[in-house]
Image (cartoon, rainbow, N blue to C red):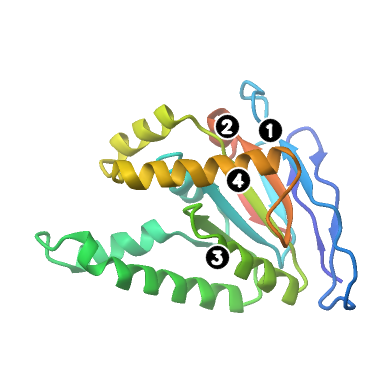
Amino acid sequence: MNRTTAYATTAGLALPEQPTAPAREAGAALPSPVVRDLRERAGRSPHALLFGPRDLVVITGLPGSGKSTLMRRAVRGRRIDSQDTRDRWDGRTPPWLPYAVYRPLVRLAHYAGLRRAVRTGEGVVVHDCGTQAWVRAWLAREARRRGGTLHLLLLDVTAEQALAGQRERGRGVSRYAFLRHRRAAGRLLRRTERGALPRGCGAAILLDRAAADTLTRVGFTG
């Protein structure tokens, strides 16, 4: 059995274990989801989060909330970030070609790379835009299939902080797209705060900007 546990290593803080097995009997009850809130701790939140070796971790939040920044700085091991895929395509396409023209190819390449990473059976940290619920549902099924747990890391930042993050990176989304992301992120955040996680998700951690900035490691045991 693969025990999936998320640890917060600074003061011995740990999420309750979420035991899983490669297969469940039909109708068997899933463990109750675990939600840990690390917001509003004024920088006194954990420096590391460690998960089980077969777990999948989804980092979600508004565009500009700092998902890619956190992944580049703190993730140890496999990480799949759609921004990395876009950067690779941007480097191969003429500068005059609008992104909208080759965006479908970028998405196809991103999901193909995600599928390959998941199929290795190793722990993977995944960038999630927040509007594609089917991706989280698929990852939840894959986590169960391999005997692991799907964890959500939700970056809870204000719209102002997210827009400032977009300006800082020099790349933004349209007003329509941002409003769509904001509605989806708001719904997910409210449900998570009530403990009503997306189906198949075993645990969630809520982070504000200070808690995300404090993290120096997001990785896997084993």
Residue 162: percent from left, percent from top:
41, 35
The answer to whether 57 appears left or right of 145 in the picture is left
Badge 3 amino acid: Val
Question: Callout 3: helix, strand or loop?
Answer: helix
The residue to which callout 3 is attached is 135
Q: Residue at x 31, y 73 (%)?
A: 105
Ranked by sequence position, the earlier of labels 3 and 4 is 3
Rendering quarter of residue 21: bottom right
Question: Nearer the observer, disc 2 or disc 4?
Answer: 4
Badge 2 amino acid: Asp
Which numbered marker is on residue 38? Answer: 1
Res. 187 visible in picture: yes
Position of the C terminus by quadrant: bottom right
The residue to which callout 2 is attached is 208
Res. 146 visible in picture: no
Quote the CA–CA distance across marks 4 and 1: 17 Å
Position of the N terminus by quadrant: bottom right
Quote the CA–CA distance across marks 3 and 4: 14 Å
Ranked by sequence position, the earlier of labels 4 and 1 is 1
Ranked by sequence position, the earlier of labels 2 and 4 is 4
Quote the CA–CA distance across marks 1 and 3: 25 Å
Q: Are marks 2 and 1 in contact (CB under 8 Å)?
A: yes
Q: Within 10 angstroms of label 2, few (less than 14), some, or many (20 or more) residues?
A: many
Residue 156: percent from left, percent from top:
56, 35
Question: Callout 4: helix, strand or loop?
Answer: helix
Badge 1 amino acid: Leu
The residue to which callout 4 is attached is 188
Question: Nearer the observer, disc 4 or disc 1?
Answer: 4
Badge 4 amino acid: Leu
